[in-house]
Image (cartoon, rainbow, N blue to C red):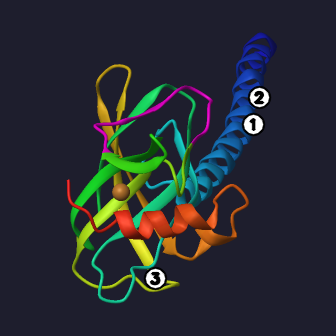
Amino acid sequence: MTKKKHVKELILKPVTKYAVLFAASAVAAAAIISQAAHAESIATSAAKSPVTISEIWARPSVPGGNVSAAYMQIKSSAPVKLIKVDAPVAGNVEIHNMNMKDGVMEMKAVDAIDVPANKMVELKPGGYHVMLMMLSKSINKGDNVGLKLTFEGADKKTFTMDVVARADEKGSSKTDAKSTSNAQEKNSAFHNH
Ligand SMILES: [Cu+2]
C-alpha cells in the first residue's frame, strides 16, 4: 500500500510542476502575441514583413492638377526591393527618381528601389518618390492617402504592405529640401513619361 502511494506522489509532482510551467508560458506567450499585434497595427498590416515604413507623407495636389507624390523612409532587416506601388486614388502610380543632370533637375521612372538590409532608404523631395498620377480626386492637406507597397525579397518572393500617407506640406520645412526642389518638383510633376 505505502509503496503504491509513494509511486503516485512521484508521478503527480512532475505533472503539477509541468502544469504550472505551462500556465506561465501560456501567459507569457499571450503577452508577446498581444504586443506583436499592437506593434503590427502601427507599423504595417503585413505579417512577418522585414520592412518598416516611417515618416510617410504625401504632397497635397495643386488646384487643377491631378498629380501628387508620396515620400517615406524604408528600413528592412533583410535586403528587399520596392518594385511596385498602387494607390486607389491614382489611376497610374510610378516610382520616380530625381537627379541633377547638367545643372537641370531630371525626373525619371525607375523599375525598383533597392533597400539594403538595415540601411534606411529615404524617399524625399529631390530624390526618390512615389508619383501619383491621374488622381480621381484632389489630395488636400490632412487627407489620408492609402498606398499598397509591393516588395521583392532576395528569394524573389513578393509581399505587400498597406500604408497610409498623410497629406502635408512637409517638403518646404525640411532642412535638406531647398525651396527650389519644391518648385521644380511641382513643375516637373506635370510632364509625362
Ligand atoms: Cu515624379
Pinpoint residue 174: horizontal percent, then vertical percent. Answer: 69, 63
Q: Which circle's residue, 3 or 1, is located before the other in the chain?
A: 1
Q: How many marks?
A: 3
Cβ atoms at labels 2 and 1 below 8 Å apart: yes
Q: Is residue 69 left or right of residue 125?
A: left
Name the residue at the front extreme: 102
- Quadrant for ligand 1 reads bottom left
Q: Which residue is mark 3?
A: 143
Range of magenta residues: 109-121
Pinpoint residue 163: horizontal percent, then vertical percent. Answer: 44, 60
Q: Which circle's residue, 3 or 2, is located before the other in the chain?
A: 2
Give the class, few, some or many, for how many residues have Cα within 10 Å of label 2's Cα (few <14, many ≥20): few
Q: Which residue is mark 1?
A: 20
Q: Is residue 36 visible?
A: yes
Task: In this rendered view, identify the residue nearer to me: 62 or 7.
Answer: 62
Residue at image point 29% right, 35% down? 158
Pinpoint residue 23: horizontal percent, then vertical percent. Answer: 69, 41
Residue at image point 31% right, 72% down? 67
Q: Which residue is mark 2?
A: 17
Pair 3/1: label in front = 3
| Label 2, label 1: how far apart the Cα atoms are | 5 Å
Amino acid beneath label 2: Lys
Residue at image point 38% right, 69% down? 187
